[in-house]
Image (cartoon, coloured by chain):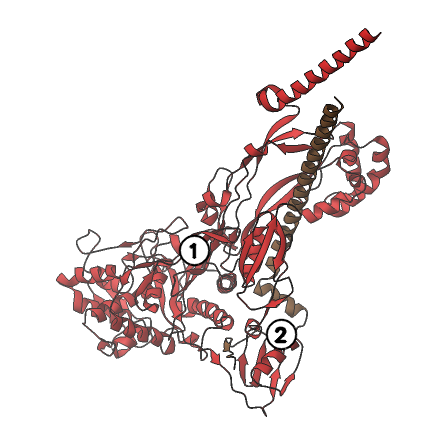
C-alpha cells in the first residue's frame, strides 16, 4: 500500500514538473518572440539608414572627407606563388 | 475495536483504489470530450508569420513588424497603488506620447477608473517593442500586469523598411485580399497557414499547450527573393524625381533597369503626379501603360531595313529638306536646317523622321507593306510576358487589311506611331539587341525561400530564338553607339564607359488628336539603351510624360540625363567593368599611397603584391593608388579574400543562422532542430570564403 502511495506521489510530482517545464517553455518562447520582434523593428529602422543616399547625407552632415567614387572599382586577382 | 479499524482500513483502501481507477480511466479510457470544460481547456489559432519580400541581396523590402496598442485595465490597481503612482504615470505618458498634458492624462485615467473601464486606450499611436519595454517601466505599470493593469495588444504591421522605394512593385494587400504588386500576386505563398493548438489552464491562470501530438503547428509564409537591387532602385527613383521637379508640365515618369544576360529587373520606378502635385508610386507606367513609342521604334525599322537587305548603314538617304509631304501628312525633322544627303546611320543618329519614313515607303509600299509589319512582329516587340506583377498593358499594332490601316500607316509605323508598346516591352526589345539578339523574359522574382533555403526557383528564361541575324545586330549596335557619340544623345557620352541607345520624342494622342486647335500637345520623352556598349551588362529605359503643353520635350534633353545618372551610379559601384587586374606588378621603389582602410588589410594586401613601400593617409580606406592620377581601386572584399571572420550564430533559429552565414559567403551544414547550440568553426575564427560551417540545433536552450 505504501508502495502505491509512493507511486501516486511520484506521479503527482512528475506531473507538476512537466507542467512547470511547459510553462517556462511557453514563457521562454514568448520572450524569444518579443526579442525577435525587437530585432526586426530595429533592423528595419537601420535598413533605411543603410541606403546610399542616407549614408551620403550623414557623411556630409558630419563633414566627412570621404568622397563619392567616380571610377569603377577594378577586381584584383591575387595569384599565390 | 479491531473490527471497526479493519472496516475503516478496507474503506480507505477501497476509496484509494476507486481514485486510482478513476485516474487511470480519465487518463487512458474515457473520451476526452467528457472531461473537457471550457473553463479549463480551449483551442487557440496560432498565426503564421507572413513571409518577407527581399531585395536580391537579401535586404528586406517588406516585412511584418509587431506593434502594440497600449490599453489599461483601470480597476486592477489597488487604491493605494493608483493614488501613489497616478501623477508620475500621467507625467511619463504625457512625455512619451506628447499628445496630451499631464493634467489631461491624470484626469482621463481617474475618470476611466471611476467608470470601471477595463480596456482604456492610452496614447495616440501604436508602439514598437522597444517602446513597449519603456512603457512597462513607467510607475504603476512596473508593478506588473496583475497589479498595474497594463495591457499590450499586439498586431503585426506590414512595413517597407525603405519606405517608398519600389512601393508599387512591392504592392500591398488589404483584409479583403485585394491589392497590387508582389504582396498581392504572391499572397498565397507569403501568408503561410495558421496552426491550431489545445490549451489547458494551469494553476496561476497560465494557459499551456497540451495534447502536443494533435497540435497543428503554423506554417510560416515563404520569403520572396526579388530581383530588385536597392542601390539601383534608389538612384532610378531619385534621378527621376529630380528631373520631374525641374518642370511643372510633367505628370509622370518611369525608369526600368534590366540585367542584359538574365532579364532580371534590377529597378522599376514609377512616379505619377497626385492631386497635391506630389509624385508618388501610384501607377505602374512601366508595365501597364502601352503608348505610341515614337523614335525608339526606329531601331525596329532599322533592323527591318538591314535584315531585308534593302539598305546598309552607309546607304545614302535624301533628307535635303526638313519637311516631306506624303499622302495627307507632312513629315518633319525637328532641326533648323535640313540634314542633306546623309547615310542611314546618320539618319538614325539624328533621329530623322523623314529619312526613316521615306526609306520605308521606298522599300515596303504596296504589296510589301505586310512584309514590313510581319518583320516588326517577328522582333517580338508586342510579346506578352505573363509577369509576376499583374496589369500588363496590351500592345496593339495595326497591320495591312485592318480598317485602321491606310496609306500613312506604313511611314507612321516606321517612326513609332500606329503601334502601342509598354516601356517594359521597348526595354525588353533593346535588351535583346544588347544580348546579341536573344530576348530574355523580364522577371521580378528570383525564388521563394524558407529560412534561407530555396523552395522554388524562377530565374531567367529565354523567349525563343534570336530576333534577327548576328550581322544585323552588329550593325545596329554601331548605330546605337553612334546616337550617343554623334547624335541626339551626345550630351550623355562619357569617356569612362560607353553607352548605346536611342532617344524617343513622341507626341501622345489626346481627345483624338496629337495637337489641339490651340497648339497644345502631350509629349512622351524617352531614352532606351544599354551599357557598356562593348559588353552590355545593363539595359535601361527612361520615359517622362508631360501634360498638355506648347513646348517640346525631347528624349535627348529630358530622358537621357536620367538614364546617365542611373548608368553612372551602376558604373561607379559595380566592379566588373574591365578585365580583372591579375597580379598587379608594382615597382618596389614607387611610393604607394593609401588613403583609407584597415591597416591590417592594407598591410596584408601590400605584402601579397610584394610591396613594402607605401604610405597611409588616413585610417579608412578601400582604395590603393600608385599615382594620384591613376587610381586603382580595390574593393574591401577583395582585400580580405584570404580569410573571412565567422559570424556568431549561437542561439539563432536555423533561418536566422542560414541568413547570416550565407550572407557572409559560407555554406551551411546543420543537424537537429530548434536553435543553434554549437557551431564549428567557432565564431570570430578567420576561415576561407565559401567554407562550410557546421551548426547543431536543439530545442533545449
When the figure is inspected, residue B145 is found, relative to residue B429, above or below; the finding is above
Query: Could you tell me which secondary element the residue under label 2 belongs to?
Result: loop
- Which residue is at 66% across, 49% downward? A38
Residue B372 image offset from top left, x and y in percent: 20, 63
In the rendered image, which residue does mark 2 sit on? A66
In the rendered image, which residue does mark 1 sit on? B444
Q: Residue B184 carries which label?
A: none
Residue closer to the observer: B226 or A11: A11
Provide the chain ID for the residue under circle 1: B
Q: Chain B is drawn in which colour?
A: red
- How many residues crowd around disc 2 within 10 Å: few (fewer than 14), some, or many (20 or more)? few
Q: From the viewer's perspective, tell me whether residue B389 is left or right of residue B174.
A: left
Asked if residue B162 shows in the view, the reply is no
Provide the chain ID for the residue under circle 2: A
Q: How far apart are marks 2 and 1 (CA)?
A: 34 Å
Q: From the viewer's perspective, tell me whether residue B543 is left or right of residue A79.
A: left
When the figure is inspected, residue B491 is found, relative to residue B524, above or below; the finding is below
Residue closer to the observer: B92 or B157: B157
Chain letter for the brown colouring in the rendering: A
Amino acid at each position: 500500500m505504501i508502495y502505491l502511495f509512493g507511486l501516486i506521489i511520484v506521479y503527482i510530482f512528475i506531473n507538476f514538473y512537466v507542467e512547470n517545464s511547459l510553462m517556462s517553455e511557453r514563457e521562454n518562447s514568448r520572450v524569444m518572440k518579443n526579442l525577435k520582434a525587437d530585432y526586426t523593428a530595429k533592423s528595419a529602422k537601420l535598413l533605411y539608414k543603410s541606403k546610399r543616399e542616407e549614408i551620403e547625407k550623414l557623411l556630409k552632415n558630419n563633414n566627412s572627407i570621404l568622397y563619392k567614387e567616380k571610377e569603377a572599382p577594378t577586381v584584383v586577382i591575387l595569384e599565390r606563388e | 475495536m479491531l473490527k471497526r479499524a479493519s472496516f475503516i482500513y478496507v474503506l480507505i483502501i477501497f476509496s484509494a483504489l476507486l481514485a486510482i481507477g478513476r485516474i487511470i480511466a480519465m487518463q487512458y479510457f474515457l473520451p476526452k470530450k467528457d472531461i473537457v470544460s471550457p473553463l479549463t481547456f480551449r483551442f487557440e489559432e496560432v498565426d503564421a508569420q507572413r513571409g518577407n519580400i527581399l531585395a536580391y541581396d537579401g535586404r528586406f523590402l517588406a516585412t511584418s513588424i509587431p506593434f502594440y496598442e497600449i490599453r489599461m485595465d483601470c480597476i486592477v490597481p489597488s487604491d493605494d497603488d493608483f493614488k501613489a503612482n497616478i501623477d508620475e504615470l500621467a507625467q511619463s505618458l504625457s512625455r512619451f506620447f506628447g499628445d496630451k498634458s499631464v493634467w489631461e492624462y491624470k484626469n482621463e485615467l481617474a475618470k476611466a477608473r471611476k467608470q470601471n473601464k477595463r480596456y482604456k486606450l492610452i496614447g495616440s499611436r501604436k508602439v514598437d517593442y522597444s517602446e513597449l519595454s519603456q512603457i512597462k517601466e513607467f510607475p504603476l505599470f512596473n508593478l506588473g500586469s496583475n497589479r498595474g493593469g497594463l495591457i499590450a495588444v499586439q498586431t503585426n504591421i506590414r512595413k517597407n523598411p525603405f519606405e517608398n522605394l519600389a512601393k508599387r512593385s512591392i504592392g500591398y494587400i488589404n483584409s479583403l485580399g485585394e491589392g497590387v504588386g508582389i504582396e498581392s500576386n504572391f499572397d498565397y505563398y507569403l501568408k503561410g497557414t495558421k496552426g491550431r493548438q489545445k490549451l489547458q489552464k494551469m494553476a496561476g491562470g497560465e494557459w499551456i499547450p497540451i495534447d502536443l501530438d494533435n497540435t497543428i503547428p503554423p506554417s510560416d509564409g515563404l520569403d520572396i527573393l526579388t530581383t530588385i537591387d536597392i542601390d539601383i532602385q534608389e538612384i532610378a527613383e531619385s534621378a527621376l524625381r529630380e528631373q520631374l521637379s525641374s518642370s511643372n508640365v510633367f505628370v509622370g515618369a518611369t525608369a526600368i533597369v534590366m540585367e542584359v544576360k538574365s532579364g532580371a529587373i534590377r529597378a522599376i520606378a514609377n512616379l505619377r503626379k497626385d492631386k497635391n502635385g506630389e509624385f508618388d508610386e501610384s501607377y505602374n507606367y512601366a508595365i501597364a501603360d502601352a503608348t505610341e513609342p515614337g523614335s525608339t521604334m526606329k531601331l525596329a525599322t532599322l533592323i527591318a531595313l538591314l535584315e531585308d537587305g534593302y539598305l546598309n548603314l552607309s546607304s545614302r538617304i535624301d533628307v535635303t529638306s526638313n519637311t516631306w509631304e506624303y499622302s495627307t501628312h507632312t513629315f518633319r525633322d525637328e532641326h533648323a536646317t535640313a540634314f542633306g544627303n546623309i547615310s542611314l546611320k546618320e539618319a538614325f543618329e539624328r533621329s530623322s523622321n523623314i529619312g526613316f519614313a521615306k526609306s520605308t515607303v521606298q522599300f515596303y509600299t504596296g504589296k510589301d507593306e505586310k512584309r514590313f509589319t510581319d518583320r516588326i512582329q517577328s522582333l517580338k516587340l508586342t510579346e506578352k510576358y505573363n509577369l509576376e506583377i499583374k496589369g500588363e498593358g496590351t500592345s496593339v499594332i495595326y497591320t495591312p487589311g485592318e480598317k485602321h490601316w491606310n496609306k500613312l500607316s506604313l511611314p507612321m509605323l516606321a517612326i513609332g506611331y500606329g503601334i502601342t508598346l509598354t516601356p517594359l516591352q521597348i526595354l525588353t526589345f533593346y535588351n535583346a539587341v544588347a544580348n546579341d539578339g536573344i530576348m530574355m523574359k523580364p522577371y521580378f522574382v528570383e525564388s521563394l525561400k524558407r529560412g534561407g533555403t530555396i523552395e522554388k526557383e524562377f530565374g531567367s528564361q529565354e523567349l525563343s530564338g534570336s530576333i534577327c541575324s548576328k550581322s544585323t545586330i552588329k550593325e545596329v549596335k554601331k548605330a546605337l553607339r553612334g546616337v550617343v557619340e554623334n547624335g541626339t544623345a551626345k550630351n550623355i557620352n562619357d569617356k569612362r564607359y560607353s553607352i548605346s541607345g536611342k532617344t524617343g520624342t513622341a507626341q501622345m494622342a489626346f481627345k483624338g488628336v496629337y495637337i489641339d486647335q490651340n497648339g497644345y500637345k502631350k509629349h512622351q520623352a524617352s531614352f532606351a539603351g544599354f551599357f557598356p556598349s562593348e559588353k552590355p551588362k545593363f539595359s535601361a529605359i527612361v520615359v517622362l510624360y508631360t501634360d498638355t503643353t506648347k513646348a517640346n520635350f525631347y528624349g535627348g534633353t529630358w530622358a537621357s540625363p536620367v538614364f546617365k545618372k542611373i548608368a553612372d551610379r551602376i558604373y561607379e559601384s559595380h566592379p566588373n567593368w574591365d578585365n580583372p587586374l591579375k597580379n598587379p606588378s608594382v615597382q618596389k621603389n614607387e611610393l604607394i599611397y593609401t588613403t583609407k582602410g584597415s591597416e591590417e588589410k592594407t598591410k596584408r594586401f601590400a605584402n601579397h603584391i610584394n610591396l613594402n613601400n607605401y604610405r597611409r593617409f588616413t585610417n579608412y580606406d578601400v582604395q590603393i593608388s600608385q599615382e594620384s592620377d591613376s587610381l586603382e581601386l580595390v574593393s574591401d572584399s577583395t582585400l580580405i579574400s584570404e580569410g573571412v571572420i565567422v559570424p556568431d550564430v549561437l542561439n539563432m533559429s536555423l533561418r536566422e543562422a542560414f541568413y547570416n552565414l550565407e550572407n557572409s559567403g559560407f555554406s551551411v551544414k546543420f543537424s537537429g532542430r530548434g536553435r543553434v547550440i554549437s557551431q564549428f568553426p567557432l565564431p570570430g575564427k578567420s576561415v576561407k570564403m565559401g567554407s562550410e560551417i557546421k551548426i547543431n540545433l536543439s530545442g533545449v536552450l
